[in-house]
Amino acid sequence: MTKQRREVYGLLLEDASHPTANDVFRKVQDRMPQISLATVYNCLEALVTHGLVNQVNFDREPSRYCANLQEHVHFHDEASGRIHDIEFKDGADIMDFLNLPEGAEITEMELTIRGKLPSRD
Ligand SMILES: [Zn+2]
């Protein structure tokens, strides 16, 4: 892993906000002022190819990146626009909820839910 990739990966591990490539670029510049946007894109692509990071697409917005490799659902909070990782309850199996044909196998999952989270005031 190159120094740049490690930096980009470290940033994604710390940042659960599902940043876009531009967000990553802006943040990584604080630590590596000479890095280019093209390099950030290359790093992100390599991390996705190696299965360390997931690329997620919401609507037609630019791709976002998520370093949480646990099975989870994305909850798009309509009020704040933020995307939260929501894990499954213990023992819950997605296969129990879907009317899939016999023998079907899920190899990849991308689930997004939109809604409102209760305010914490
Ligand atoms: Zn996520």
Image (spheres, rainbow, N blue to C red):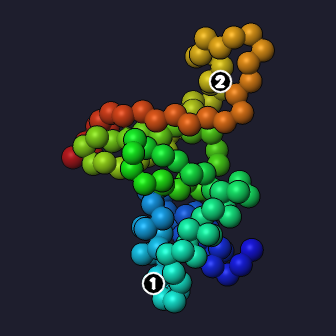
Residue 114, compared with residue 38, is above or below; it is above
Instruction: Say if disc 2 is inside 8 Å of ligand 1.
Output: no
SS of the residue at dot 1? helix
Q: Hey, which residue is sitting farthest left in the picture?
A: 121
Q: Nearer the viewer, residue 79 or 118?
A: 79
What's the residue at 62%, 30% (across, down)?
Answer: 90
Q: Is residue 118 visible?
A: yes
Can residue 10 be seen from the camera position used here?
A: no
Image coordinates for residue 32, horizontal then vertical, percent: 53, 86
Look at discs 1 and 2 and give the one toward the viewer: 1
The residue located at (33%, 33%) in the rendering is 115
State whether residue 87 is above or below residue 5: above
- In the image: residue 73, left or right of residue 103: left
Q: Residues within 10 Å of mark 2 (few under 14, many from 20)?
A: few
Q: Residue, x 62% and y 24% (percent of image)?
A: 94
Q: Is residue 60 above or below residue 102?
A: below
Query: Does residue 2 appear left or right of residue 68 in this picture?
Result: right
Disc 1 and disc 2 in contact, CB within 8 angstroms: no
Q: Quadrant of residue 106?
A: top right
Type of residue at label 1? Asp
Look at mark 2 in the image and give the residue it sits on. Answer: 93
> Toward the viewer: 74 or 49?
49
Task: Pick whichever of labels 1 and 2 is earlier in the sequence.
Answer: 1
For the residue marked with disc 2, what is the amino acid?
Asp
Give SS at disc 2.
loop
Q: How many angstroms separate mark 1 from mark 2 (CA)?
A: 41 Å
Residue 48 percent across, percent down from the top left:
65, 57
Callout 1: 10 Å neighbours few (<14), some, many (20+)? few
Q: Measuring 60% from the left and 64% from the top, which residue is drawn there?
A: 44
Q: Position of residue 61 (x, y in %)?
A: 39, 50
Instruction: Find disc 1 in the rendering and name its residue.
Output: 30
